[in-house]
Amino acid sequence: MKQVIVLLALLTAFQNASAQLFTKEKVANNIDNLDQKFLSWGYFLGFNQYDFKFNYEQDLKDILVDKTFGFHLGLIGDMRINDHLNLRLEPGVFFTTRNLIYDESYFAGTDFNSSDLIREVKSTYIHVPLLLKVSTKRINNFKPFIVGGFSTALNLSSNQDNPDDNSAGEFRMKKNTYFYEIGFGIDLYLLYFKFTPSIRGVFAINDEIIRDTDPNSPWTGNVSKMQTRGIFINFTFQ
């Protein structure tokens, strides 16, 4: 039901935006004073899909990542710099799950079972980005923008301090991750509020894997670096 409501809202917003963008007729501006405020507030919700990028020590088959769609929500603090630049803080909570699937070649010469080939990685992130939003001139009730910046995330599901490793079924990741982000979106000025659909890519800067005690571990021995990357689809209300 929630997906249907979101889809209908997007279709309506897109129809209105298209009509305003491609017509020469002057349309009455909604909430003219919103973008003139030095500070403004809002909230967002949306969907995410996280992945991993691996670098390897040896040329073995890739570790496959079975991705799922997660959910996130958070708050927005927006500081106006001028008509085209805004500085934004967007703290949020992000929920996601990834499954790592190993090829049998990683376990050559050892005894293993089917459960050893899969590791489930559940993550709950407190994600805090500092972003610069660069907007075009407003066209009627429509204003495209690009956004980029840096962020940090605390993984509440991290088992970094767990003494058990993959030999006991525990795939471990670091608590803190640092990202750079880039994306684009459209501000749609409705009658009482501003609605903003956007899409953003996030890319980890640091290595996140915690290696097993055994340097030749089939799960971590061949991984020289593991970094999160992901896509966020956001719906913002201000």
Image (cartoon, rainbow, N blue to C red):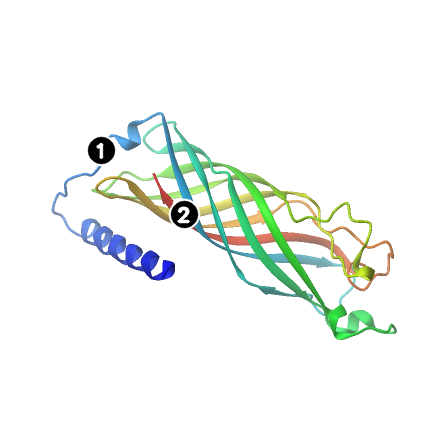
Q: Amino acid at mark 1?
A: Asp
Few, some or many residues within 10 Å of mark 1 (<14, 14–19, 20+): few
Can you say which quadrant of the picture contains the N terminus? Answer: bottom left
The answer to whether 153 appears left or right of 70 in the picture is right
Residue occupying the point 82% across, 49% down: 163
Residue 41 lies in what quarter of the image?
top left
Please give the residue where the numbered disc 1 appears in the rendered image.
Answer: 32
Can you say which quadrant of the picture contains the C terminus? Answer: top left
Q: Residue furthest front?
A: 1
The answer to whether 51 appears left or right of 223 in the picture is left
Kindly report which numbered mark, 1 or 2, lies closer to the viewer in this rendering: 1
Q: CA distance from mark 1 to mark 2?
A: 22 Å
Q: Amino acid at mark 2?
A: Phe
- Give the structural element (helix, strand or loop) at label 2: strand
- In the foreground, 198 or 123: 123
- In the foreground, 223 or 236: 236
Residue 47, position in %: x, y? 46, 54
The answer to whether 204 appears left or right of 115 in the picture is left
Task: Point out which mark residue 184 bears.
Answer: 2
